[in-house]
Image: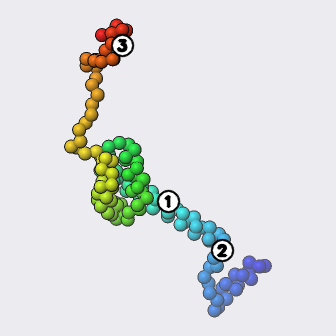
Amino acid sequence: MMQEERKERENAPGTDCAPQSGPQEDARDERIAELERLLADERYGRAVDGALAGLAFSSASAKSAFAARLTDARLPLEDGTLAGLEEFVERYRRGDPAAFADGDRPVFVRPAGGAAYTGQASALRAAFGLE
C-alpha cells in the first residue's frame, strides 16, 4: 500500500516529479566519477608513453624518473598529446642534462678478447698458465 500512495503523490498535479536522490544514486554517481577518473588517468598514461617514445635517455632509471615527473606534472591533454611537453623537456634537461642521451657524448667501450694483459693481472695469468 505504501508504494501505491507514493506513486499517487508523485503523479499528483502540482508536485515536482524530480527523482529523489538516495543512497543508490549517490553510490552510482561516485562510481561514475571514479570510472571517469580512471579513464582520464589511462588517457594521460598513454600520452606519457607516446612522449617517452620520442626521447632518448641515458639509462632506464633516467627514463623512469622522467616518466614519474611527467606524470606528476599533469600537463593538459590536447587531442591525445601533452600540451607544453617541449617546455617541460627543456626545463628537465636544464635540471638534469645527464638524463638524456646525446649524440655528441663519447661512448665508453671495454676491450673484448684478444687484448694484451699488463700489470698484476698478467703475472696471475702466467702463474695459472693462461698466457
Q: Quadrant of residue 110?
A: top left
The numbered mark at residue 38 is 1
Position of the C terminus, as image quadrant, is: top left
- Tell me the quarter of the image containing the N terminus: bottom right
Residue under label 2, please give it.
22
Mark 2 residue element: loop
Task: Give the residue at mark 3.
Answer: 124
Relative to 116, say whether 67 is above or below: below
In the foreground, 61 or 42: 61
Q: Is residue 35 visible?
A: yes
Distance from the alpha carbon under mark 3 to that under mark 2: 83 Å
> Of marks 1 and 2, which one's residue comes earlier in the chain?
2
* Residue 103 x, y percent position in the rendering: 22, 43
Helix, strand or loop under label 3:
helix
Marks 1, 3: nearer the viewer: 3
Q: Element under label 1? A: helix
